[in-house]
Amino acid sequence: MRVLLQSMFSLLLSAAILLMGHGLQYTIVPLYAVSLDWAPSTIGYIGSSYFLGFVFGCLSVPKLVARVGHIRVFTVLIALTTASMLFIGMVNHFESWLIARLLMGWSMAGIYMVIESWLNEKTSSDHRGSILSIYAVITLFAICVGQLLVGFDIGFERLFMLAAALLVLGILPIGLTSRTAPNPIPDIKFSFKRIMSVSQIAMVGAFLGGFVTGGFWALGPVAADSNGLDAGQVGIFMAITLLGGAALQYPLGRLSDFIDRRLVIAGLAIVGFIICIVAVQPFFESPSFIFITMFLFGGLVFPLYALCLAHANDNTDLSVIEIGSGVLMMNSLGSVFGPMVVSSLIKYTQHALFVVSAFAFFILACWTIYRIKFHKVEREHFMPFVNVSKTTHEVIEMGIDEEEPDDSQAPLAGESEYKHAPEVEPIPNPEA
């Protein structure tokens, strides 16, 4: 294991450095738009543009990697992301920002795919869970640090330059590595109709989860600013939400291994609805109360993606990659629409993020309860929960092994299959 980590050190170091810059840009772009007195609806469309680019990136970057290779694509995507971010800092023009954010989303999807495919190929199945855990912890830590850098009182211009510098520095470890590049990334191939027929809860839940998280990433800083938080507190607001998701995802996932996952999803949606209702009350003003509420909010919304993925895989003989790609795309599409809806309401109430999230949680709870009552599932293809980060389909392939189970580990007649569920390393979900 130690030798394996040493061989991947340059790759993991690159990920840590560039994701700090990525985490920083997540927050400074909407805050900078607020400082320019742009309308919330405008900021929402800019956020949606990023996630639309991310969808396009997942679909198109594998072909580009197959043509010119991982390292060249990685370098080009970092350059494009950096240039787009600096362009936003230089030009205060809505259409230009839309294009720049679209390119940033496309580039970041490709960057994640390159890193994850490299980890996937260079890791044996014996150590894949551990490496995935380490990668996810690094991802979480780096993005959180990037969020907290917003608190530096150096002005937006220098913050953009700092984010750009971190992204560019992320090229160095990989650019100087002597390790061979992995094989080309497989294309995403799936059918929405086929996956929807297998698990409607998974697809609806993934869409609504992306709907909420997309609104959070795009307009969370705007919501925090409208509640009177300063720049440093906005960074804490964003980071603590992510930490909440990391803290509660594993316990919720393990619980879903022992009871019907649909009950966990329904319970999560009901509690999420209650948290959102509490968040819109008049006493939601103290920074301490806001941070506690956001920790719980993150803990309830970020695990949705992995839970939906696990539930879908329990009830189908379709390949893990096909199921994972469909759930990922549904989640990403939700992230496109979420910011637009939140931004259209934020001019009427500063609690628009929580109002929209409450509505999404309510729909998910009702739909899940309806399916539990009228549709029985057998979990014929049960797999223990794996905390999968919502980035690209490469990390899904890393996190879930499609090999046939060992007969010696199969439950005996009359025994519960859950008794044999192995322990799984906790993996956070930084961008779900």
Image: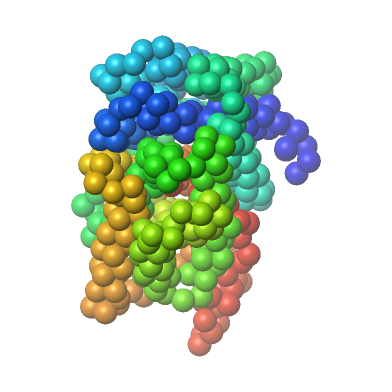
Give me the residue at 40% from left, 64% from top.
278
Q: Is residue 265 above or below residue 393?
A: below
Give me the residue at 53% from left, 51% from top.
287
Give me the residue at 31% from left, 68% from top.
365
Q: Nearer the viewer, residue 287 or 244?
A: 287
Q: Classify residue 218 by image quadrant.
A: top left
Residue 334 drawn at (x, y percent): 30, 46
Which coloring applies here? Answer: rainbow
For residue 216, side relative to residue 287 (left or right): left
Q: Is residue 346 above or below residue 112?
A: below
User: Which corner quadrant holds the N terminus?
Assistant: top right
Evaluate whether residue 327 shows in this view.
no
Residue 378 drawn at (x, y percent): 36, 75
Q: Is residue 378 above or below residue 212?
A: below
For residue 26, side relative to residue 337 (left or right): right
Q: Nearer the viewer, residue 36 or 219?
A: 36
Evaluate whether residue 196 shows in this view.
yes
Q: Nearer the viewer, residue 391 or 279?
A: 279
The number of discs equals 0
